Image (spheres, rainbow, N blue to C red):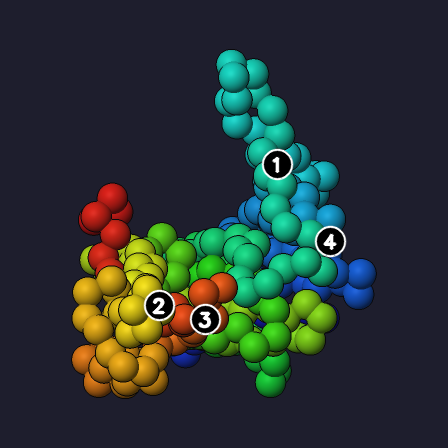
Amino acid sequence: MVIRVGFKYSGKYLLGFEAKIKPQGDVFVFVFERGHRRMHVSYHKNGRVNHNVDRPDQKHVPVEWDIWGTMEPMIRYEIPVKNIVGRQRVAGTGWATEDIERAALPEFVPIPDDIVVEPTTLTVGFSVNIISPGTPARSVGYLSQPVLARHVRGTAPLIEVETFDWMAPQAPAKLLVTTIHMIAPGIDGAWLLDDRERFNKWEEAVTAVVEEHGVPHTYRERNDGGVNLYYHRLEDDPYQL
C-alpha cells in the first residue's frame, strides 16, 4: 500500500512524501524535494529504523552521525511492528508554507486514499506513526505540538499521519498522576478510609469517596478484605515546562 501526502497550493497539487507499507510489515517514508526524493526513513518489521539521504540518479546513502567520536549510520532500534501497542513514531517531516512552491515538489493527481493539506499556518509538519487498533487520537503530538488533523490508513499495520504547526507555542507536557484511596478493616470492626475516617461498612466508605472524588477509574481488592480506589489525572510535567 502507498499513501501519498501532499498540498493543495496555488491551484496545484504538490506531493510532499509517500508512506509505503510492505506486506511483511516494513514501512518506508519517502520525502520529495527539487523534483526527486530527498530522503527516506525505513521502519523494518524487526524494529530497526534507518535514515537515508536520496540523491538524483544515485543509490541512497545512510545519514551519518557522530557517536562516541566516530561517524556511524543513523540507526535506531524500536519495537518490532507486530509488538506495537498504542503509537510508535516512524518519521517526522515538514515544510515552511512559503517554501512549498520553491521546493519544486512534483505535481500529482490525488486519489481517495491520498492525504491533501491546504496550509493555513506558517509551517506544516507531519508525524508518521504506526498504531495498534483502537488507539485514540491525541491532542498533543510530535515535538509537543498540538495536533491539527489526523488521518489513519491501512490495516496491518495501521498508519497514522498527524499534522501540526511547529512554529506554534509548545503545549505543556503532561504527567499522569494517580491518587489511591484505601479502605481497610480496623481492629475494632470499623472500616477505615485512608487510615483516618471511620465507617460501619466498607460500602459507606466507598460512597463517601465517590461523593467527593467521583467514580474511580479502577479499583483493586485488598488481601485484608478492603479495596483500593484509583483515580488518574493529567498534570503539567514540571520537568518539561
Total numbered badges shown on the rendered structure: 4
- The label shown at residue 225 is 3
User: In the rendered structure, which disc, 2 or 3, sits on the residue that comes first in sequence?
Assistant: 2
Viewed as shown, does residue 181 lie left or right of 115? left
Task: Count neighbours of disc 1 (C-alpha within 10 A) and say few if under 14, some if 14 to 19, many if 20 or more.
Answer: some
The three-letter code of the residue at mark 4 reads Lys
- Nearer the camera: disc 1 or disc 2: 2
- Depth order, front residue of 68/213: 213
Element marked by disc 4: loop
User: In the rendered structure, which disc, 4 or 3, sits on the residue that comes first in sequence?
Assistant: 4
> Is the C-beta separation of discs 2 and 3 under 8 Å?
no
Distance between the Cα atoms at labels 4 and 3? 46 Å
Q: Quadrant of residue 191?
A: bottom left
Rendered location of residue 44, percent (x, y): 71, 50
- Which residue, given by chain and number where applicable, does mark 1 sit on? 75
The three-letter code of the residue at mark 3 reads Gly
Distance between the Cα atoms at labels 1 and 3? 51 Å
Rendered location of residue 212, percent (x, y): 19, 80
On-image quarter of the N terminus: bottom right
- The label shown at residue 184 is 2
Viewed as shown, does residue 158 lie left or right of 200? right
- Nearer the camera: disc 4 or disc 1: 4
Query: Residue visible at 29% across and 74% down?
Result: 190
The three-letter code of the residue at mark 2 reads Ala
> Is the C-beta separation of discs 4 and 2 under 8 Å?
no
User: In the rendered structure, which disc, 4 or 2, sits on the residue that comes first in sequence?
Assistant: 4
Answer above or below: position of 224 versus 142: below
Rendered location of residue 4, percent (x, y): 59, 69
Element marked by disc 2: strand
- Which residue, given by chain and number where applicable, does mark 4 sit on? 45
Distance between the Cα atoms at labels 4 and 2? 48 Å
